[in-house]
Every structure is written in C-alpha cells, then in structure tokens.
Amino acid sequence: MHARRARSTTQPQQNKLNTILAAILILAGVLVFSYPIFADLVSNQQHNQVITNYSETVSTLSAAEKQKQLKLAKEYNDNLTGEPLHDPFVEGSGYALPTNYTDVLNLNGDGVMGYISIPKIKLNLPIYHGTDDEVLAKGIGHMRQTSLPIGGKGNRSVLTGHRGLPSAELFTRLDELDKGDIFTISVLDETHAYKVVEIETVKPDDLDKIRAEAGRDLITLVTCTPYGINTHRLLVTGERTAYHPDQVKEPVVSFSPNSPDTWFRFGGLAAVVTLLAIALWRWWRRKRRREAVARVVAASVAGTIGGVVAGGAAGSGGGTGVGGSDGGDAGSGFDSGSGGSGAGIGAADVAGGGAGAAGGAGGAGGARQGRRRQARTVAGMGTKQFEPGIDEKLRDISD
C-alpha cells in the first residue's frame, strides 16, 4: 500500500514536468517560425528609413549637382562597352570596372544609389553599389559590370538580391512576377518605369542573357532559384515604358499561396499554433477529468464512511438491548422459577444477537455498496483517461 501511495504521489509531479517541457518546446517552435516574420518587419522599417534618408538628401541637392551626378553616371556607362561580365553570386569569376565606381551616385557615402519598387509584391528596397555579401544582406546590389540604372537606350542594368533569407524577404517573391507587371527605379529625382517582358531560368555561367542590347533600355532583376537549392539564376527583365504614377498601385493584399516562402513562414507558424491549441485543449480536458474523479472519490468515501457509521450504530443498539433483556429476564426467572428464567434469557439473547448482526451487516453492506458504486462510476468514465495512480488510490480507499 505504501509503495502504491508513493507512486501515486510522484506520478502527478512527473506529469507536471512533462507538461512544462511540452509547453517550452511549443513556445520554441512558435518563436522559430515567427522570427522570419518579425525580422522582415524590422528590415522593412530599416529599408524605408534608408530610402527616406536618400530622398531627403536628393531634395537638398541643387540642379547643377544633380546634373553633375548624372553626367558622371553616363560616362561610367559609356566606359563599360565590351567589358566582361561575371556571376554576382560567384566570387572571383572575373570583373572589370572603371575606377570611379564608388564615387558615382553615392550621395550619402553609404553606397545607396537609388531604390526599386515592385508594387505587385509590395517591395521597396534600396539599391547599393556592388554585390558583396554585406550589401546583399541588407538590400539590392548593383552588378558593377553593368550600366548604372539611370536609363538610356543601349543600357542594361543588372540588380541582384538574395532569396529566402530568414532576416529579410528581399527578392524571395521575385518569381511571382508575370509578363506585363511594372516595377520602377528611382535615382536622384527621376523615376523610370519598366514592364516585365522576359522571365528566364539560366545556369550561373550563362551570362549572355544579361548583356546590353542596342536600342533597348533594359533592367534585369536576378536572384537564385529554385528556392532553397540555388543551382540556377532567375532572370526577370523589364523594358522601359512610360511612367504613370496613378497606374502603378500596390495591391491591398499581397499574398501568394504558391510561394514556398509563404508556406514556410505562415504555414509553419499556423502548424505550431495549432499544436499549441491542441495541447491546451488536452490539458484542460485532463484537468476537468481529474476534478470529476476527485468528486467521485469524495462521494464514494463519504458513502463508505456513512455506511460504516450507520452499521456501527445499529450494532451498538442491538448489544444494549441484549444486556437489558438479560438483566430483566434473569430477575423474573429467579422470582418465578428456573424454567421461566431460562426461557426469558434465551429469547433476549437471540433478539440482541440478531440486532447486532443486522447492524454489522448493514455497515458492511453500505461499505460494499459504496465501493461498487465508485468502481462502476470510474469504469464508466474510463480510468485510463484519468491521472496515473488513480487506480491505486481507489484500492487504498477500498482497503
């Protein structure tokens, strides 16, 4: 009995520990899947702040300074004719550039030359000089072997961005663009619109697809693909079109069920939240069942004790009657004769013994009935669903 009680005492403690560990694991899952969402919100705020700072700086420039910057950018683009290209994601694949690259369109000295807006996927990102890891971790990089994004026929600017970073969305949803979609490039106080005319997937060394074409003003957006594998390059090319600010509007809701990033971020978070809801529901159900068992046990114990007390009281009353009858009948027998007294004493003993037996039987019957009622109730509710050790508790009570 003592061993059973020890087990029934330690089992709830083990269950409580398991519940705490499960809650910690679920919370950790929520944090893991929530991180990309909140990190992207923070990075968007940072991107917007960088764009705001750039726009404020541009607004303070004189017309002469703006013309000077545009002239330097055009000279840079003219000097790129015939220079070899390289894969921006493969370091050391060859590059050549004029020596003044970092001095052109670098108004704040932070490497920002402008910004890109893609209304369809609600994207606004600063464009930085170069494509090194530091640049691609915080925004869109300009491939320095291509034209600066100031427009002009015969130019093709190549802008690159990572896909699937946990800390920022960047070009993760670039594959959602379709032919005919519009994106804009803002440099200094000019904004140029480009309509998507070509979408291709190529190998990293297939660089002919991003060379300039005579008579065309092109910008190509580049990112890695497939998502998470990154063995190829996704090229989204836009050609210059008339810019109408009222026609370039962001959608009210920017959500794509076909995006793997969407499934990872929101699908994973939804799965973890669902598990948390199930865990809370199971905890609540176990709590209700424990309370129900406690009520059943309390009622059964009360019934058992009441039956024992009632039986004891009946047995005590029967014993008292035997004593009184014995005394009274014995006195009468001595006065009247030995035959009568013997008969009187025998009758009283039988009556008293019967009352005592009836009382004891009533008490025992009440106890047995209480235990049977308790067992039926617990069996009906399913003892396996109750807290571990309840069967030992019930046997202890029965003992």
Image: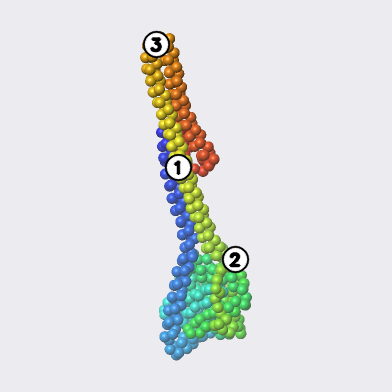
Q: Disc 1 marks which residue? A: 294
**Percent coordinates x, y for residue 310 in the rendering:** 43, 31
The residue lying furthest to the top in this view is 338
Image quarter where the C terminus lies is: top left
Snapshot quadrant of residue 318: top left
The residue shown at (60%, 76%) is 181
The mark found on residue 53 in the picture is none
The residue shown at (45%, 39%) is 299
Can I make out residue 212 in this image? no
Q: Disc 3 marks which residue? A: 336
Can I make out residue 115 in this image? yes
State the separation of the CA atoms marked 3 and 2.
Answer: 113 Å
**Callout 2: SS:** loop
Amino acid type assigned to the residue bearing label 1 in the image: Ala
**Callout 3: SS:** helix
State the separation of the CA atoms marked 1 and 3.
Answer: 63 Å
State the residue in front, 333 or 169. Answer: 333
Report the mark closest to the observer, 3 or 2: 3
**Percent coordinates x, y for residue 108 in the rendering:** 42, 80
Amino acid type assigned to the residue bearing label 3 in the image: Ser
As drawn, is 128 to the left or to the right of 153?
A: left
- Tag 3 and tag 2, C-beta contact below 8 Å: no
As drawn, is 55 to the left or to the right of 172?
A: left
State the residue in front, 221 or 303. Answer: 303
Sequence-wise, the earlier of marks 3 and 2 is 2
The residue lying furthest to the front in this view is 336
The mark found on residue 258 in the picture is 2
Image quarter where the N terminus lies is: top left
Residue 337 vs 26, above or below: the answer is above
